[in-house]
């Protein structure tokens, strides 16, 4: 019986590995009851190449149910002492994360790196595109295939919408979307939800999204998740940067377009984004809206005591620096929460 199980395990290598995913769901946490330690290790080594938690890749927030999201938030909470360096962990020892960033990043790349290292894992980074084989014309599919042989998980940021989905289709290891053009940024959404929960409230809250709602991928992801938590959503933006109609139609939530002064006294969260200069088709269009909104302490006069201001950062000039000292500012705490959230995501994908 054991022998035949080992043989079939060996054969798994040659099957389309979907089977592995099914076995994963059936066997997770029960492996030791059925098979020897050696077979467990072999099976886990294959599973780890495919993602072992609730999901195989993390490409879009749409893939997650409310239950999945709450599960990740609870997991992040458990990881917080490790994220703060108060406790040590070796949960992902021996695992490697590859950061593939085809667009600039500070927080996302570094917090993934911190998360992986805090869990005892290691990180490899693709150097600037000009110094990698991308400059020689290597396709994304080839880069992904190659990097999958060096790492257990790939974190990808790319300027094209759909790039992460495409990468996942070509990858033998889990792929995490760290931003695909103006598309999605699901890990940012998870940390945004976590921040709301910790610093204000999430379920049933009133949230104003302010700024460049047309091109901000953080908003495009967040608005879909907010709908799952019965929030009331207010949109505040210059006319040229309104949220595309398709989102308003698609998202099943109470959404209205307003001015900040109309809602400042009732909202729980004010989520501000920068104008996404790099997404504008031409410079002239950008110049027409540049500097068109700036949040100052003056504008917060009527805010509720517990109202929080969030921003995925980087900020350019849309939040005046004298807002930082008000009781409302939470954007730097928000940046920290990226670490426990990404620890939760990695541990879920890699089975730590
Ligand atoms: C955001 C992004 O890259 O979409 N940054 C981030 O990941 N924290 C927001 C932005 O660049 O404006």
Image (tube, rainbow, N blue to C red):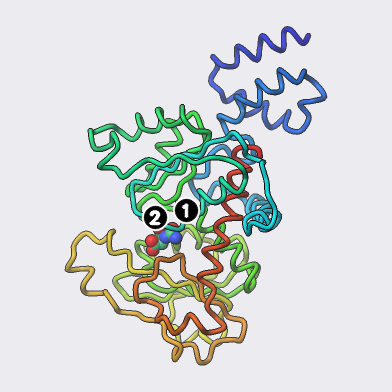
Q: Quadrant of residue 20?
A: top right
- The verdict on label 1 being within 8 Å of ligand 1 is no
Decide if ligand 1 comes within 8 Å of the CB at mark 2. Answer: yes
The residue singled out by tag 2 in the image is: 105
- CB under 8 Å between callouts 2 and 1? yes
In the image, residue 140 above or below residue 257: above
| For residue 6, side relative to residue 136 (left or right) | right
Kindly report the distance in space between the C-alpha atoms of the residues bearing marks 2 and 1.
Answer: 8 Å
Tell me the tag on residue 1.
none
Query: Whole-percent x and y of residue 136?
Result: 23, 33
Q: Residues within 10 Å of mark 1 (few under 14, many from 20)?
A: some
Query: Which quarter of the rendering shows the C terminus?
Result: top right
Disc 2 versus disc 1: nearer the observer: 1
From the viewer's perspective, tell me whether residue 326 is left or right of residue 273.
right
Q: Is residue 331 above or below residue 2?
A: below
Residue 328 in the image: state x and y as whole percent: 55, 81
């Amino acid at each position: 019986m054991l022998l035949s199980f080992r043989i079939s395990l060996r054969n798994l290598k040659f099957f389309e590995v979907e089977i592995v995913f099914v076995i994963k769901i059936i066997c997770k946490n029960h492996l030791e009851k059925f098979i020897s330690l050696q077979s467990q290790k072999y099976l886990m080594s294959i599973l780890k190449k495919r993602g072992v938690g609730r999901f195989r890749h993390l490409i879009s927030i749409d893939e997650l149910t409310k239950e999945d999201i709450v599960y990740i938030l609870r997991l992040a909470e458990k990881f917080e002492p490790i994220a703060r360096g108060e406790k040590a962990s070796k949960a992902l020892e021996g695992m490697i994360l590859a950061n593939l960033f085809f667009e600039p990043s500070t927080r996302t790349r570094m917090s993934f790196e911190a998360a992986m290292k805090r869990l005892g894992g290691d990180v490899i980074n693709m150097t600037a595109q000009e110094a990698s084989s991308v400059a020689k014309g290597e396709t994304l599919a080839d880069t992904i295939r190659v990097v999958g042989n060096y790492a257990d998980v790939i974190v990808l940021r790319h300027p094209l919408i759909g790039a992460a989905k495409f990468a996942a289709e070509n990858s033998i290891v889990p792929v995490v979307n760290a931003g695909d053009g103006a598309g999605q940024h699901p890990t940012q959404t998870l940390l945004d939800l976590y921040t709301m929960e910790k610093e204000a409230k999430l379920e049933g809250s009133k949230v104003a999204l302010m700024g460049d709602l047309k091109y901000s991928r953080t908003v495009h992801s967040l608005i879909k998740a907010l709908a799952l938590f019965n929030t009331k959503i207010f949109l505040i933006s210059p006319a040229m940067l309104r949220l595309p109609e398709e989102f308003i139609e698609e998202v099943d939530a109470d959404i209205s377009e307003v001015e900040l002064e109309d809602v400042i006294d009732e909202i729980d969260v004010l989520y501000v984004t920068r104008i996404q200069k790099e997404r504008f088709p031409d410079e002239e269009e950008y110049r027409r809206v540049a500097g068109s909104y700036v949040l100052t302490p003056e504008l917060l006069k009527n805010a509720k005591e517990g109202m929080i201001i969030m921003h995925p950062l980087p900020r350019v000039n849309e939040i005046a620096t004298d807002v930082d000292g008000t009781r409302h500012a939470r954007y730097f705490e928000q940046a920290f929460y990226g670490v426990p959230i990404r620890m939760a995501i990695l541990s879920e994908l890699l089975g730590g």
